[in-house]
Amino acid sequence: MHKLRWLVLALLTIAVLAVAGCGDDDDSGGGGGGGGASGEPIKVGASLPLTGEFSEPGKAAQQGYKVWEAMVNDSGGLIDGRPVKMVIKDDQSNQNTIVADYNALISRDKVDLLLGTFSSLLNLPASAVAERNRMLFVEPAGGAPELFDRGFKMLFFAQQATADKQGEVWANYVTQLPENERPKTAAYPTLDDPFAQPTSEGIEEIFSKAGIKTVYRETYTIDNPNYDGIASAIKARNPDVVVHGATFEDGVGMVRALRKSGFTPKMLYQTTAPSLGDQYSKAIGKQTTEGIFYAVSHSKEASTPGNEEFVAKYQEMFGGDEVPEDAADAYATAEVLQAAVKGVGTIERNRQLELADWLRENEVDTILGPLTWDELGRPEGEFLVGQWQSGVPEIVLPKEAATSDKIIPEWRPDGGG
Amino acid sequence: MTEFLQALILGLLIGGVYALLASGLTLIFGVMNVINIAHGAFLILAAFITWSLWRETGMDPLLAIVAVTPVMFAFGWLLYNATIRPIRRAPPAASVLLTFGLALFLEGIMGVIWGNTSHSVRPGYADERFQIGELFLPKAQVYGGLVAIVVLASLYLVLTRSWLGRAIRASAVNPQGAELVGVNVASVAALTFAIGVASSGAGGAIASVLYPFLPGSHYQWIARLLGIIVLGGMGSLPGAVIGALCLGVAELMTVTYVGPEWATGVPYVFVFIVLLLRPQGILGTRLRQDVATA
């Protein structure tokens, strides 16, 4: 028995070492390799949720930053011909770890510039560290309104709008439908999340003003897997439209629970989950996706400046046909940082407020389209509206950015139409 | 009334599944006095193995139980001998720390093998239902509940009708006495642990159909499962079944009539009430601390 114990322990040790070896992902080692830039590298630091709950978007964001690093270095560096070196840490989706990580990036790794992390939950504490150190903090995925209620000077969100405005374009589309097609009642099941909740509340506000009656509004927590109970309660109230403030797992869970309950609302809108492409359609079934609406920041078909090059480079580096939205958002975030650095012509620590002031005064062209910000770093644009059509995510609104010429008027999980 | 009956049915169905998920945990505690914090991670591991079998071979996830259970049994036996056996004489706190470490370790390994992304097992019936009048019974839950009944009944019969079961119960009640009548308590402990882990094979397979999961999902399960076995009486299998059914119904009633955000607190409220009013749980028995050695 003793021999067996030692054998198992030895195997476990080998496994641990193997895992540690695979997981060592800290410094990216320069990347790019294009040879276009020379001189001492400019260190750009970020901490991302590479493991844990948000690891999926975290890894996509890491890819976006790496694509930017490679493209900047290929094209002669960020400033004065100096290449960029990304220093990326793993915060394990943990709010405490991320504070330690950004402190370490600033004081130990002595990075020249910072980039933000994924999700409002993590950007909330991370941006406070940056603000305290007077370093510019442009972030790719922290749209919760409360981030911008703190009067920070160095914080900028690099998407089109904050969470409360995310569903605005879609909500306006619904309220402007002809009387006989417009929904009369709505249900709002929502995850207790700083992003999902304000999005759903923003839509409810527009709907309520247009006379669409709220028949169900409840919040649930991420560790509550009782979607069947929620679906059953929604079914009992029979709303025309369900607006679901979701992340991923709960988005999938809720769609499946609605299917199980046999209730199909006329329209279904979800935050976040439907924008995760293949993973979403595999999880709920391709046919079930037909007609589901969502908001999205990026389309790989968009004709925005640099988008084609970004998509090509992404596919060259990481393969596959899809380009995750989170990778595009991260890339756009780095584009914003780059524009500020080029605009002011400095990366000095004590002049980063100038970078922030420059962003407040200028419009930046990104692959998400042109971005501008108000005094508090809130973007002032509009999101795109996506819809799943024939198993493919399409952009349907606004018209000028649409990749499909039709809008499916309802959710058709059983096909038809 | 329909809403109430619907919540009751959904609560009982999910309670049956909870009972299966908690059975291994209560068994391991009852016999070995080990609070196995890694039980949730074992469930998720079984869910991932089921996912791989379903994905690669197209095997029905409920049928996959036949394959996953022996794998989990062997895994449990190896794990016991390598990690739990050396600390058998240590205070219970040591087992809590050790199994928590195991849970973190398994989470990391699963992340490397399957990735930290959400996985779902979707057989053809996953989103279908049986309709009885205005009430719906999700097929996956019904099948899951039936499998839970079969597995729990088998486990109960083994514990009450077989020599192994008697040896397990004897080891739980009085290890020295069991040794005296020829029971090899150490081997029985290893087998019990392995059976407990094997039961998570069936539980994980069912959970994989009902809920999307990722390596970190084990945290949300362990709190709920501990609530169930505290409610039922730690170490009692019938107690775990009653505790699970109560919790399932209470959660669904809370979701329906109070609000889903309160459902998360239900297991904790249960633990609090039980500890206050009946610390030994519904079917637990008080041990005489003056003669009990565990």
Image (cartoon, rainbow, N blue to C red):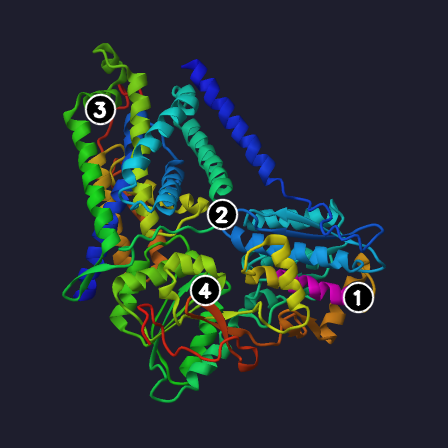
Residue under numbered circle 2: B116
Q: Chain of mark 3?
A: B
Mark 3 Cα shell of 10 Å, populated few (<14), some (14-19), many (≥20): some
Q: Does residue A304 sit above or below A75 in this rendering?
A: below
Q: Are marks 2 and 4 in contact (CB under 8 Å)?
A: no
Kindly identify which numbered label has been placed on residue A170.
Answer: none
The quadrant in which residue A357 appears is bottom right
Residue under numbered circle 3: B169
* Gap between marks 1 and 2 measured at Cα: 37 Å
* Gap between marks 3 and 1 measured at Cα: 75 Å
Residue B153 locus on image (x, y percent): 17, 36
Q: Quick one: SS at disc 4?
A: helix
Q: Quick one: SS at disc 2?
A: loop
* Gap between marks 4 and 1 measured at Cα: 36 Å
Residue under numbered circle 4: A274
Q: Tell me the kind of residue under disc 4.
A: Pro
* Gap between marks 2 and 4 measured at Cα: 18 Å
Q: Give yes or no for residue A331 being in the magenta stretch.
A: yes
Q: Is residue B283 visible?
A: no
Q: Quick one: SS at disc 1?
A: helix
* Gap between marks 3 and 4 measured at Cα: 51 Å
Q: Magenta region: which residues?
A: A330-342
Q: Tell me the kind of residue under disc 3.
A: Arg
